[in-house]
Image (cartoon, rainbow, N blue to C red):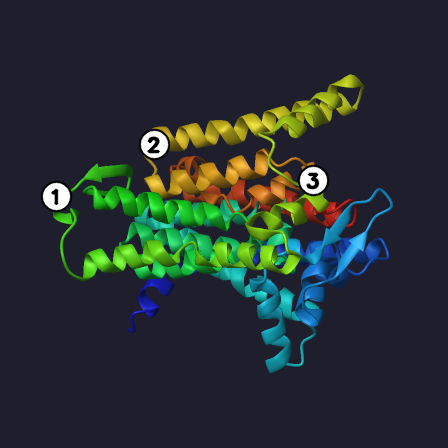
């Protein structure tokens, strides 16, 4: 048995379950779309952000749309790794750029599922790992995992980087954080996790399964390969995000903060959640929109509660840092409020309290729970993409 076969065999139940859930979602989407006279393939590969990624892959950067209100939507807002992979797939196969993005997302979603399993198995055991993967698969917006979007690619890179941190593979963690930083702006969350873990380990603390960080004299700073690998991993981790942001600043002629101007053209920024709070508050000014307001409040409360439970359960510090940064960036962005569930999708550690609870049930009962939620998720995903969909 090779070094890869053993962990793949351990992850097989999670990966097979994940593939079954996603296949169900795609089948329901195809049937629903056909009934409405729409094309499921177009919904997955040629709408919303998928179009922007495809344009970058095909034509490069420089495309922008000027709106009547003066806003400028520039494709510089979209990080380059997914378009690079789309271009690569187009170059080595007969696939179009859009179909290349779809294939990349499908493969990346499986890699993400495996990475989530690896992290959770390391911390809480195999059964919890399987449950975490299945819960990630049945998220209400889980259909995005099969779209030509960057969420699956980013989640895969983030999960495996976090796993590398937890297992002391610092160069791997840094390299994967670099690529995560070339995928989405929230790649900074992966960088933060690597840096916090690295700094903590230099002080003699180390991540351990089932606890945040514990003092371990055996891992205190020591001369040799361990120290330089740790330092080098921390050094290369931010190069992806920093490199792209600096390149955008040079391209726009606006210096290091040029990327913020690009985001401002999309009316997107970080305001501490003030705009989102106003958006939620406005829902309570009439009925039945007040019901949506209640749902939003409950949803945000659930996210915060799951994070607090994760802290109390002793999740490793890198997971808590990663979760905290991505959650803060998602909830405190000043626009595209309908995107927030999608933006939270990579924060798989939020699912760990639920995964632990599911793992304690009998297998038959947990299978019924997951199966029922999977059907509901598939139906909602088909309804969502055939309606407003992800902006």
Q: How crowded is mark 3: few (under 14 residues within 10 Å), some or many (20 or more)?
A: some
Work out whether 333 lies above or below 173: above
Image coordinates of residue 388 in percent, x first then y, are 77, 44
Relative to 26, 179 lies left or right: left
Q: Residues within 10 Å of mark 2 (few under 14, many from 20)?
A: some
Nearer the camera: disc 1 or disc 2: 1
Observer-nearest of 375 and 33: 33
Front residue of 204 and 76: 76
Name the residue: 33% across, 57% down. 233
Q: Where is residue 256 in the image (x, y as percent from the top left)?
A: 55, 50
Please state if 151 lies on the left or on the right of 262 as rendered.
left
User: Nearer the N terminus, badge 1 or badge 3?
Assistant: 1
| Image position, residue 257 (x, y; %) | 58, 47
Report which residue position mark 2 lands on. 313
Q: How crowded is mark 1: few (under 14 residues within 10 Å), some or many (20 or more)?
A: few
Cβ atoms under marks 1 and 3 closer than 8 Å: no
The number of numbered discs placed on residues in the rendered structure image is 3
User: Left or right: where does residue 132 sit relative to residue 390?
Assistant: left
The answer to which of marks 1 and 2 sits earlier in the sequence is 1
Q: Is residue 178 left or right of residue 88?
A: left
Query: For the residue labelled by badge 1, is the local secondary structure a helix, a strand or a loop?
Result: helix
In the displayed structure, 315 sits above or below 65; it is above
Q: Nearer the viewer, mark 2 or mark 3?
A: 3
How far is disc 2 from disc 3 in space, using C-alphas? 32 Å
The image quarter containing residue 47 is bottom right
- Rounded to the nearest angstrom, the CA distance separating label 1 from label 3 is 47 Å
Pointer 1 residue = 217
Question: Can the viewer see residue 186 in this picture?
Answer: yes
Q: Which of the two labelled residues, at mark 2 and mark 3, occupies the earlier sequence position?
A: 2
Q: In the image, what residue occupies the spot 60% across and 29% down? A: 273
Q: Mark 3 points at which residue?
A: 336
């Amino acid at each position: 048995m090779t070094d890869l076969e053993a962990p793949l065999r351990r992850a097989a139940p999670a990966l097979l379950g994940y593939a079954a859930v996603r296949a169900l979602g795609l089948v329901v989407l195809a049937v629903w779309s056909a009934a409405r006279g729409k094309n499921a393939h177009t919904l997955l590969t040629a709408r919303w952000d998928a179009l922007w990624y495809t344009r970058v892959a095909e034509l490069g950067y420089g495309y922008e749309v000027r709106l009547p209100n003066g806003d400028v939507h520039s494709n510089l807002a979209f990080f380059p790794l997914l378009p690079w992979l789309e271009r690569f797939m187009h170059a080595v196969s007969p696939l179009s750029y859009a179909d290349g993005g779809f294939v990349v997302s499908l493969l990346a979603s499986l890699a993400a599922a495996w990475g989530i399993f690896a992290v959770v198995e390391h911390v809480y055991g195999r059964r919890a790992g399987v449950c975490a993967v299945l819960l990630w698969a049945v998220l209400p917006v889980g259909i995005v995992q099969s779209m030509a979007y960057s969420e699956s690619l980013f989640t895969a890179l983030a999960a495996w980087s976090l796993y590398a941190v937890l297992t002391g593979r610092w160069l791997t963690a840094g390299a994967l954080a670099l690529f995560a930083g070339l995928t989405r702006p929230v790649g900074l969350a992966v960088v933060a996790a690597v840096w916090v873990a690295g700094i903590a380990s230099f002080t003699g603390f180390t991540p351990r399964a089932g606890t945040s960080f514990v003092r371990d004299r055996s891992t205190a700073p020591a001369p040799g390969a361990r120290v330089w690998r740790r330092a080098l991993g921390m050094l290369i981790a931010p190069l992806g995000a920093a490199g792209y942001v600096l390149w955008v600043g040079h391209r726009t002629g606006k210096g290091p903060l040029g990327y913020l101007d690009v985001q401002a053209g999309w009316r997107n920024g970080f305001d501490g959640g003030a705009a989102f709070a106003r958006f939620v508050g406005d829902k309570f000014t009439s009925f039945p929109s007040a019901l949506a307001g209640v749902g939003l409040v409950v949803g945000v409360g659930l996210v915060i509660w799951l994070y607090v439970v994760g802290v109390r359960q002793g999740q490793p510090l890198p997971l808590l840092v990663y979760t905290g940064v991505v959650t803060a960036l998602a909830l405190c962005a000043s626009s595209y409020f309908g995107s927030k569930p999608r933006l939270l999708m990579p924060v798989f550690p939020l699912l760990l309290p639920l995964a632990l609870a599911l793992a304690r049930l009998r297998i038959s009962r947990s299978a019924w729970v997951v199966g029922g939620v999977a059907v509901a998720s598939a139906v909602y995903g088909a309804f969502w993409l055939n309606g407003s969909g992800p902006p």
